[in-house]
Image (cartoon, rainbow, N blue to C red):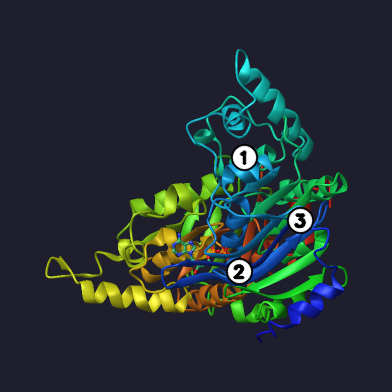
Amino acid sequence: MMNDPTSSKKDAAETGDADSALIEVRDVRKHYDAVHALGGVDFHLKPGEVVGLVGHNGAGKSTLMNVLAGTVERSGGSFRLGGCEIGAWSAASAQQAGLRCIFQELSLCANLTSAENTRIVHRSLRGLGWRRRARQVIGPVLDEIFPGHGIDLDRKVADLPIGERQMVEIARAFTQTGIKLRAVILDEPTSALGHEATEQLLAHIRRAAGRGIACILITHRLNEILAVCDRTVVMVDGKVVAERATAGLSRAALVELMGSIERPRDRSAGKAASVQAPVIRHAGRDAADLTIEVGKGEIIGFAGLDGHGQRERLRAMFYAARRQREALPGAYVAGDRGSEGVFSLWSIADNLTIRSLNALTRGGMISSAAARKLAETWSDRLKVKAPSIDTPILSLSGGNQQKVLFARALASDAQVIFLDDPMRGVDVGTKQEVYRLIRAEAENGRSFVWYTTELEELTNCERIYVFREGRAATRLEGDAIETGRILQASFGGEHV
Ligand SMILES: Nc1ncnc2c1ncn2[C@@H]1O[C@H](COP(=O)(O)OP(=O)(O)OP(=O)(O)O)[C@@H](O)[C@H]1O
């Protein structure tokens, strides 16, 4: 159900006006040739306010944030800062105004250390001993937001796992030297964080708001919006369609405002028709590390705190399957699309069909007609939002890029698909579609091994393995797959 765009005026009255706004934009537009990423958006942010921004993939959330952060130039509309009209606005002006952005595709320089990356946003860190001072700027902020993080500030960012990179990016945005920090935009900051780090960040956002630092939180995890935001703004197709005080708002109401309906999962619908002899039996490294069994048509989940060996085991299983490629074709959907998944100079079609070239070869040549058909079919099935399959992949929104990676695996001949937290950044409506697709593919005999940091997703699985300290420590099946038991197994039974 689509909402009446005019309702935003009435809602603005409900949620407080923009009089005392730190930032206020009106009728902001942004187009990329024929694509209208923003079609006239009004938005404001007050000091110390936490505003949630939600909407489907490609709704324009990141574009709006990039306009505010000065990293994308608006095509039209007005911009006021502290009540003063602003003309030209750049990343440097935003920095000077105390406005920071945590970007969805992370903006850290991979070949520099965390301390050196801190220097990039703090020009005052210069002269003798600047590295030491940079460490002293970011270190305490990291410790405050993510106590016990264990990140070595002198390691190159490229060598950090994605979750740690995300923590550094977040902490860097909250560092202060000379310029007073006024607002932080967080574009899907938790998509690469585990459960504990997510909780720590959400608590920090509320603490920062208490100190007068405003935050804009973009996330597809609606529980996070409900947990920390004062006000929620909903975007659909480049426009703001609703704005509500978050207090009293339910998850279902929010989903409906976005134009989707969330259906409760029917567990029996996900059951594979018949689980036969395992197609994979993957032994652990010792007696405490469970053997993982995957039957034909089964959906197997990997759970536990992020970084406890799930990703390493998933890869080991994928490589083992690859060694018997003829017998067991497998495909891997990477979670860290920036560094492992996307061929950034290629189109959607080329990215989508790369895993299927053998099947698309006719008489020694790749059939471009067959490749286009395959790309079109799967791009439609996953509702990739783009003008055509020839669109360069990097011009897609983050969630739509992720859908293309997913489509690459599903379109292939793979009989076992390894999913490395692939739904990060995918909107609620599409997730539901993808879950249905996975279950349907499983019923047709495909098997899935699915690592996810989103506990709710595990209810799609027949069986899950909860990892702890590098091992598959606990096996849960059927109705035993529920949040309390998963958390208990993740923490070794100490905290529930
Ligand atoms: N550089 C670009 N060139 C062409 N089109 C672009 C570019 N950047 C964004 N777009 C388009 O603008 C629209 C809005 O994208 P945006 O990234 O703002 O969406 P989003 O709401 O943040 O989505 P997601 O939840 O997937 O991150 C999309 O249709 C996207 O393809």
Locate residue 174, reporting x and y percent.
Answer: 72, 40
In the rendered image of this protein, does residue 166 appear above or below residue 372?
A: above
Q: Earlier in the sequence, mark 3 or mark 2?
A: 3
Identify residue for label 3: 83
Which sits earlier in the primary sequence, circle 2 or circle 1?
1
Q: Is residue 310 left or right of residue 316?
A: right
Give percent across and percent down for residue 364: 13, 65
Is residue 180 visible to the viewer in this orientation of the structure?
yes
**Marks 2/1: CA–CA distance:** 24 Å
> 483 or 379, which is in the foreground?
379
Disc 2 within 8 angstroms of ligand 1 (CB): yes
Residue drawn at 64 percent across, 38 percent down = 168
Q: Amino acid at mark 3?
A: Gly
Q: Residue tagged by mark 2?
A: 427
Residue bearing the label numbered 1? 164
> How many residues crowd mark 1 within 10 Å: few (<14), some (14–19), many (20+)?
many
